[in-house]
Image (cartoon, rainbow, N blue to C red):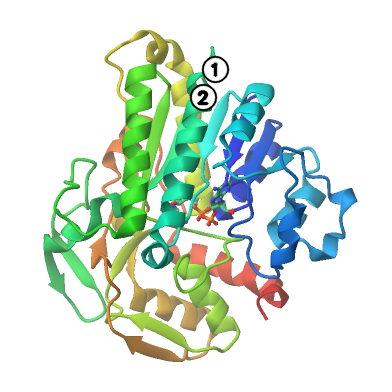
């Protein structure tokens, strides 16, 4: 049994990880400050955040609390939830020292590139200061936990657009590199957006902490992750956002011509990869601690070429699944948008013996079914 601490444990990826690891009988601890709480969140409920205390649903009116928090507290009472801001270094250190996690999955962060342009300082606080506080607490552990940082393909920025790309009827096709972008793609002289910069800073800090303090660490530079319990909006979580709009018969705005391509990775495939990663690092833990030349495990993570789709193709899948036309408006391209991003997943597949199982058609169908069952949350 592991003691798994998930920062951002009430977000989309965090809550899915929490359920999976709790179901497997692990001791799970979540830290989250509800800065991305999903629908039905009332600002005044922020006073639910009692510094340093474990959240107890019996002390509050459960109908007033955000969906993910209520869901986890009611269905997984064994999961410990701290409503805390990672920027509070003293509390974070106290939690890590007292809970003694054997694994930390850092899923917390400001996640919208659009919002980061509107407010780069908040983005910096959540994505850099929050992370440093966590790493500092980890550095002081005598037996440091395995540390996984959820990074992003935005670390590569828009230089990706200078690759050889062909414009086809419903999508851009990547000609070179033919299998997608590897971990060696350059990060300089490119437009990242502030989100890309703060995640890249985090990515580099995790690399340095791994090398300097021999913390057994990994970095997943992730493409588009999607699945149930994602509360998408126009600025982040686009599959979920498109499904919500379609089910509510609301207009969908596409920025650019809709031929932009991403490789989709369904949440259960990501979770299985996290599990493979933990097992791999566990069996090499002593090497991480004793070998001065150890390098962090850096992987591009996504659905790869097989699961790459354009926005237009996704709209077509949704429209066919719902058996109705969608109301689509086109607007100008957003700053910092990548035309095609496809992860070359050969390294992660080889090292961690993993490959994605869920096709975009099946995964999107699952998102539609979950959203239909919870449509009241979005009305
Ligand atoms: N979902 C994707 O497609 C995707 C793709 C690439 C990278 N990522 C990365 O994966 C991670 C998880 O993404 P997600 O989709 O679950 O996002 P999310 O927004 O659903 O979850 C992030 C969680 O972090 C919490 N949080 C933010 N700042 C915090 C702080 N200072 N203290 C405590 N909690 C804080 C939020 O309240 C939220 O619950 C993020 O770091 C994101 O950058 C996600």
- Looking at the image, residue 369 sits to the left or right of residue 111; the answer is right
In this view of the protein, can residue 91 be seen by the observer?
yes
Residue 83 x %, y %? 69, 46
Q: What residue lies at 31% left-to-right and 79% top-to-bottom?
A: 258
In the picture, the quarter occupied by the C terminus is bottom right
Q: What residue lies at 25% left-to-right and 65% top-to-bottom?
A: 338
Q: What residue lies at 46% left-to-right and 17% top-to-bottom?
A: 283
Q: What residue lies at 50% left-to-right and 62% top-to-bottom?
A: 363
In the picture, the quarter occupied by the N terminus is top right
In this orientation, which residue lies closer to the viewer: 327 or 133? Answer: 133
- The residue carrying mark 1 is 141
Q: Marks 2 and 1: in contact by CB < 8 Å? A: yes
- Looking at the rendered structure, the secondary structure element under dot 2 is helix
Residue 135 x %, y %? 47, 30
- Looking at the image, residue 31 sits to the left or right of residue 119; the answer is right
Q: Is residue 263 above or below residue 280?
A: below
Residue 149 x %, y %? 44, 38
- Looking at the image, residue 281 sits to the left or right of residue 44; the answer is left
- The residue carrying mark 2 is 138
Q: How much space separates mark 1 and mark 2, taking CA atoms?
A: 5 Å
- Looking at the rendered structure, the secondary structure element under dot 1 is loop
Residue 371 x %, y %? 63, 71
């Amino acid at each position: 049994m592991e003691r798994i601490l998930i920062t951002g444990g009430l977000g989309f990826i965090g809550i899915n990880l929490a359920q999976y690891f709790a179901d497997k009988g692990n001791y799970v601890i979540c830290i989250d400050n509800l800065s991305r709480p999903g629908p039905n969140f009332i600002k005044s409920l922020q006073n639910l955040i009692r510094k340093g205390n474990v959240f107890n649903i019996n002390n509050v009116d459960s109908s007033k609390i955000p969906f993910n928090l209520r869901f986890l507290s009611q269905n997984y009472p064994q999961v410990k939830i701290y409503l805390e801001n990672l920027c509070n270094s003293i509390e974070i250190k106290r939690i890590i020292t007292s809970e003694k996690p054997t694994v930390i999955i850092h899923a917390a962060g400001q996640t919208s590139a659009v919002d980061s342009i509107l407010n780069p300082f908040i983005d910096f606080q959540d994505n850099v200061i929050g992370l440093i506080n966590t790493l500092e607490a980890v550095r002081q552990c005598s037996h440091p936990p395995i540390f996984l940082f959820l990074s992003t393909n935005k670390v590569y920025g828009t230089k990706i657009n200078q690759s050889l790309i062909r414009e086809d009827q419903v999508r851009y096709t990547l000609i070179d590199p033919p299998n997608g972008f590897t971990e060696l793609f350059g990060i300089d002289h490119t437009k990242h957006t502030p989100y890309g910069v703060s995640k890249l800073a985090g990515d580099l800090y995790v690399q340095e902490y791994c090398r300097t303090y021999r913390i057994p660490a990994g970095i997943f530079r992730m493409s588009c992750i999607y699945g149930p319990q994602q509360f998408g909006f126009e600025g982040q979580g686009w599959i979920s956002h498109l499904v919500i709009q379609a089910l509510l018969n609301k207009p969908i705005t596409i920025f650019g011509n809709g031929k932009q391509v991403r490789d989709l990775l369904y949440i259960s495939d990501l979770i299985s990869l996290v599990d493979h990663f933990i097992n791999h690092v566990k069996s090499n833990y002593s090497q991480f601690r004793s070998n001065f030349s150890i390098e962090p495990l850096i992987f591009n993570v996504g659905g790869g070429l097989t699961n790459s789709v354009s926005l237009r193709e996704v709209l077509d899948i949704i429209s066919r699944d719902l058996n109705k036309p969608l109301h689509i408006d086109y607007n100008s391209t957003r700053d910092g948008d990548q035309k095609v991003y496809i992860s070359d997943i050969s390294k992660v597949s080889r090292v961690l013996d993993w490959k994605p199982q869920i096709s975009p058609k099946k995964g999107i169908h699952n998102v539609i079914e979950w959203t239909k069952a919870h449509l009241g949350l979005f009305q």
